[in-house]
Image: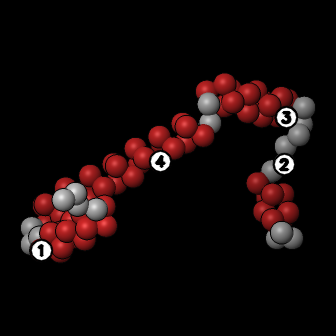
Amino acid sequence: MKTTLATRKINLVQNFLALDNQETIAKVEVLLDAEKARIYEESISKRIAHQELNEMLDKAEDDFKNGKVISAAQLLEKMKSW
């Protein structure tokens, strides 16, 4: 019988709660952080194709050259009205 994802998660949490070793817990934390970062980067790369990113950067550079920018202070002021 195949174990469901929910069951696997429960088992993982139970095993984690049973841990009584600081080093092992630290290793799990590092592993989870690294995996979250990898998943985030992967999702970003899927959403924005390389060509799209280059187009966005080109537009941003053109906007900057043409003075279509505002300062951080101006942006903060503008955000107050949102």
Q: Position of residue 43 (x, y in %)?
A: 51, 44
Amino acid type for the residue under numbered disc 3: Asp
* Above or below, 33 relative to 21: above
Q: Are marks 2 and 3 in contact (CB under 8 Å)?
A: no
Residue 40, numbered circle: 4
Q: Earlier in the sequence, mark 4 or mark 3?
A: 4
Q: Nearer the viewer, mark 4 or mark 3?
A: 4
The alpha-carbon separation of the residues under discs 1 and 3 comes to 56 Å
Q: Which of the 4 image quarters holds residue 45?
A: top right
Q: Nearer the viewer, mark 2 or mark 3?
A: 3
Residue 63, numbered circle: 3
The alpha-carbon separation of the residues under discs 4 and 3 comes to 28 Å
Q: Is residue 47 toward the left or the right of residue 73 in the image?
A: left
Amino acid type for the residue under numbered disc 2: Ile
Local SS, label 4: helix
Local SS, label 3: helix
Please give the name of the residue rendered at 43% of the width and 47% of the height, measured from the top-left corner. Answer: 39
